[in-house]
């Protein structure tokens, strides 16, 4: 038997030595093979969608070769690995990105064209996998691309939701949410691992036994489900390395349910099994907002429990001492959603591996690190101890244990400081008591970071002040970044082409600092012409998209002004639309024969989803759409002003919208947007920013120069004072007259929907204008005036646009990831030799 299988393996080994070739004929042959054998289609029954499927499968084959080799290489070298844990990965479409990273786009374009298809139209066939809400999930996706590209031995771990973020329809000015069953047509980019399943327990009880004079805890009973692995290969750019995003799906456990069987209730037994699948069924559609639902906690624990089993199994493959653990793994928590991993790893080490608690705890916190993404209080996770203790009884005990050991140490350093103790405690002494996941994350990590300088600073001076005083060295900054592969190379092919020509190659794609060399041509007329031509072509593409999706004709010569992001009061889409109303009223007040001399044509576009339960956010959408209706049909205005609500903003739409934008709005109340990441994408694509000194805008200003941005509004340390002043003033007195006029128009019913729009304006008139729209409105008007002045001067605008793009290299996620690798994870790159340079 064993000899036989050895021979077989040798034979297999030999056969597997050959790699797929990438010449046109081989590519075409592999596509046609998939048409016939994977899809079982004939040429008489074949559509562009089938072409997409067959092409994707042929690309998948190529990805899998590199993917397997990479995993083997990392194992062979026993590298220290990074595990990036995130409840969201907002990946966007795969096909184009994969082809570009594999450097096969040209080969495929040609191969596919001869088979009768245009590759760009094939791209459009793909669903947009949207397993994330916004910035946090998209950041995780950009980070995977950079980790692969920088040859870092990394794994992403997340959840394979059956339903991604809902599809947004806009009807009569209202948002409707349609479930996004994105797996409808299968998913060629994943590898289902039928053999990688881990048991996950919920509920049950803890039994105490005594063994060798020691108390032991055994968690048992309750319910079991399985987590099954789905692997998604992530190719790096200009490297053979291809890493893995492993997503978990819940399935019923295989165990036999005697209870239901004995009761003879067959259908009841089936129902129980269905419930297990429901756990990973839907992504919670809240951005920066905590909901506190048990199902959500189940999702979090499933992710954490399966991942820790996988990580520990991989560590134990080799015989070694547990003390090596922090030298072999680095676990990064993307926000507190996967923070139970800290408790879970400790549980495994003490309850199952029988390590001493002090020793185990040191291994744990040296392995973990935590990224905070917001200081908004409504986003901070606090699980009631009843809910948590019921679902995860042993974990609640361990949380108390961690807290006890920690607070002991604190009270030695700060005796009798009860205030400090209660602010540092993991337990909030409210009724009912709550577990503060941020405190748990900080205590269980050796490094904590914010996502932009201003945000990291705020963490140490406000939210986490007491923790900072305890362990200042734990706190770091890692300014966010975005991948230049998707956000320049894929979405702005023309700009990439221009860079290639100017820089004599494409190495800027992995070293964005190179585009700085273009400083000497920012005023060169030829270069400026090329720049303008590219922007115009991108604008044409968006114009076509808007026609198709909104039925609105927009003026190509107008300034394309865009605010796309999740709807949130702190992001102040409300302030934007209030300004638009002001602009509209001003146009109408100007005599008809002077209007074109006074006003520049503008197209103001909004896009973004509101969480289904967020009433004010939905009212803002309604206001925008009502204003759009009025303005777009007003013959007095003509094409001087058009307002568009871009429906269903997502990654693939962003790839069309961002390169076409000339002015983008990032206008949050100072201190409230941790970083923002679309601001970086816009700048890379030559859009100017109108924005507040908030999040990464501050650092963008440092890089591109304040003179190349339109900055306005209160600074972060003015906010508190402004809020205090406001409390003693009548809003209509403290609002500028332009704003009062606008509010009055809405109040009069000029835009219809009086009842709900009145509710909306009352949030700033009666409820103390928490987001300070009234305080910032005047300087917003002034900034807008400057925008118009600059846009009149085409050469100046173009120069500003170029300066933004070529000075944006700091915001490549390659820079961010290199800093994480060096300053938090302590991991080195391991690059696999490319077999095509030898064997192929
Ligand atoms: C957060 C913040 C953003 C930040 C993003 C990524 O609101 O400002 O850019 O994470 O760090 N909840 C989010 O999307």
Image (tube, helix red, strand yellow):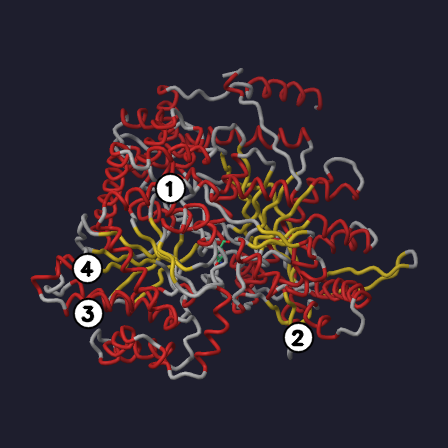
Residue linked to disc 3: 585
Between label 3 and label 2, give the one nearer the viewer.
3
| Snapshot quadrant of residue 262 | bottom right
How many residues crowd mark 3 within 10 Å: few (<14), some (14–19), many (20+)? some
Seen from the viewer's position, the closer of residues 691 and 442 is 691
User: Quick one: label 2 or label 1, which is nearer the N terminus?
Assistant: 2
Q: Could you give the CA–CA distance between mark 4 and mark 2, rounded to whole angstroms?
A: 53 Å
Residue linked to disc 4: 641
Q: Could you give the CA–CA distance between mark 1 and mark 3, rounded to whole angstroms?
A: 34 Å
User: Quick one: label 4 or label 2, which is nearer the N terminus?
Assistant: 2
How many residues crowd mark 4 within 10 Å: few (<14), some (14–19), many (20+)? many
Kindly indicate whether the residue at mark 4 contacts the one at mark 3 (C-beta within 8 angstroms).
no
Seen from the viewer's position, the closer of residues 773 and 3 is 773
For this view, does 309 lie left or right of residue 376? right
Look at the numbered disc 1 and give the secondary structure of its residue.
Answer: helix
Q: Could you give the CA–CA distance between mark 1 and mark 4, rounded to whole angstroms?
A: 27 Å
Pick the quarter of the image with the N terminus: top right
Residue 162 shows up from this direction:
no
Residue linked to disc 2: 433
Kindly indicate whether the residue at mark 4 contacts the one at mark 1 (C-beta within 8 angstroms).
no
Q: In this rendering, is residue 11 above or below 77?
A: above
User: Quick one: label 1 or label 4, which is nearer the N terminus?
Assistant: 4
Look at the numbered disc 3 and give the secondary structure of its residue.
Answer: helix
Look at the numbered disc 4 and give the secondary structure of its residue.
Answer: strand
User: Quick one: label 1 or label 3, which is nearer the N terminus?
Assistant: 3
């Amino acid at each position: 038997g064993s000899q036989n299988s050895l021979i077989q393996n040798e034979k297999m080994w030999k056969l597997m030595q050959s790699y797929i070739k990438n010449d046109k004929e081989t590519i075409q042959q592999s596509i046609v093979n998939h048409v016939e054998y994977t899809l079982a289609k004939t040429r008489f029954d074949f559509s562009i969608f089938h072409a997409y499927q067959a092409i994707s499968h042929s690309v998948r084959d190529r990805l899998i070769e590199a993917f397997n080799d990479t995993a083997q290489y990392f194992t062979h070298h026993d590298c220290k690995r990074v595990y990036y844990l995130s409840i969201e990965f907002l990946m966007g479409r795969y096909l184009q990105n994969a082809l570009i990273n594999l450097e096969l786009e040209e080969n495929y374009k040609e191969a596919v064209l001869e088979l009768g298809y245009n590759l760009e139209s094939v791209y459009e066939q793909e669903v947009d996998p949207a397993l994330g809400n916004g910035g946090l999930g998209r950041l995780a996706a950009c980070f995977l691309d950079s980790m692969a590209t920088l040859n870092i031995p990394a794994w992403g771990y997340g959840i394979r939701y059956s339903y991604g973020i809902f599809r947004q329809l806009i009807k009569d000015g209202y948002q409707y949410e349609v479930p996004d069953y994105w797996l409808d047509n299968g998913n060629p980019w994943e590898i289902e691992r039928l053999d990688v399943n881990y048991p996950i327990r919920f509920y049950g009880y803890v039994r105490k036994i005594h063994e060798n004079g020691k108390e032991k805890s055994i968690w048992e009973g309750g319910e079991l489900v399985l987590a099954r692995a789905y692997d998604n290969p992530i190719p790096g750019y200009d490297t053979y390395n291809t890493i893995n995003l492993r997503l978990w799906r819940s399935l019923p456990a295989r165990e036999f349910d005697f209870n239901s069987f004995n009761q003879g209730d067959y259908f009841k037994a089936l129902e129980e099994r269905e419930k297990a699948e429901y756990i990973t069924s839907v992504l919670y559609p809240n951005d920066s907002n905590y909901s506190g639902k048990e199902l959500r906690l189940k999702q979090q624990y499933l992710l954490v429990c399966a991942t820790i089993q996988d990580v520990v199994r991989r560590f134990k493959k080799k015989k070694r001492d547990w003390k090596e653990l922090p030298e072999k793994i680095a676990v990064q928590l993307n926000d507190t959603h996967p923070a139970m991993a800290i408790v879970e790893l400790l549980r495994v080490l003490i309850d199952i591996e029988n390590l001493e608690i002090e020793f185990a705890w040191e291994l744990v916190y040296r392995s973990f690190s935590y990224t905070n993404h917001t200081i908004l209080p409504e986003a901070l996770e606090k699980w009631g101890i009843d809910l948590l203790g019921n679902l995860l009884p042993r974990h609640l005990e361990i949380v108390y244990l961690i807290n006890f050991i920690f607070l002991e140490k604190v009270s030695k350093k700060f005796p009798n400081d009860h205030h400090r103790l209660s602010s540092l405690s993991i337990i909030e002494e409210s009724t009912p008591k709550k577990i503060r996941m941020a405190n748990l994350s900080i205590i269980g990590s050796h490094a904590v970071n914010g996502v932009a300088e201003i945000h990291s600073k705020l963490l140490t001076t406000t939210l986490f002040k007491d923790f900072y005083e305890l362990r200042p060295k734990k706190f770091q900054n890692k300014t966010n970044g975005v991948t230049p592969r998707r956000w320049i190379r894929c979405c702005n092919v023309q700009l990439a082409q221009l860079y290639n020509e100017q820089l004599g190659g494409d190495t800027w794609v992995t070293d964005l600092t190179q585009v700085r060399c273009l400083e000497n041509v920012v005023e060169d007329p030829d270069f400026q012409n090329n720049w303008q031509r590219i922007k115009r072509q991108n604008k044409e593409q968006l114009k076509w998209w808007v026609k198709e999706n909104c039925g609105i004709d927009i003026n190509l010569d107008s300034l394309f002004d865009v605010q796309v992001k999740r709807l949130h009061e702190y992001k102040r889409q409300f302030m934007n639309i209030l300004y638009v109303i002001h602009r509209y009223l001003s146009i109408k007040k100007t005599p008809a024969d002077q209007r074109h001399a006074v006003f520049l044509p503008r197209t103001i576009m909004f896009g973004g989803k509101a969480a289904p339960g967020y009433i004010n956010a939905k009212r803002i959408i309604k206001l925008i759409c009502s204003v759009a209706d009025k303005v777009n049909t007003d013959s007095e205005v003509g094409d001087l002003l058009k307002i568009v609500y871009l429906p269903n903003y997502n990654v693939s739409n962003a790839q069309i919208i961002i390169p076409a934008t000339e002015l983008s709005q990032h206008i949050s109340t100072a201190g409230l947007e941790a970083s923002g990441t679309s601001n970086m994408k816009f700048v890379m694509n030559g859009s100017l920013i109108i924005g507040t000194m908030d999040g990464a805008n501050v650092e963008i200003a440092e890089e591109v120069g304040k003179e190349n941005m339109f900055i306005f509004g209160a600074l972060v340390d003015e906010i508190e004072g402004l809020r205090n002043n406001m409390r003693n003033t009548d809003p209509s007195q403290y609002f500028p007259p332009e704003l009062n006029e606008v509010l009055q128009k809405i109040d009069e019913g000029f835009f219809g929907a009086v009842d709900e729009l009145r509710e909306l304006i009352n949030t700033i008139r009666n409820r103390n204008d928490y987001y300070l729209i009234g305080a910032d409105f005047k300087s917003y008007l002034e900034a807008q005036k400057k925008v118009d002045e600059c846009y009149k001067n085409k050469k100046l605008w173009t120069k500003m646009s170029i300066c933004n793009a070529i000075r944006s290299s700091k915001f490549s996620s390659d820079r961010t990831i290199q800093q994480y690798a060096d300053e938090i994870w302590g991991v080195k790159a391991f690059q696999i030799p490319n077999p095509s340079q030898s064997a192929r």
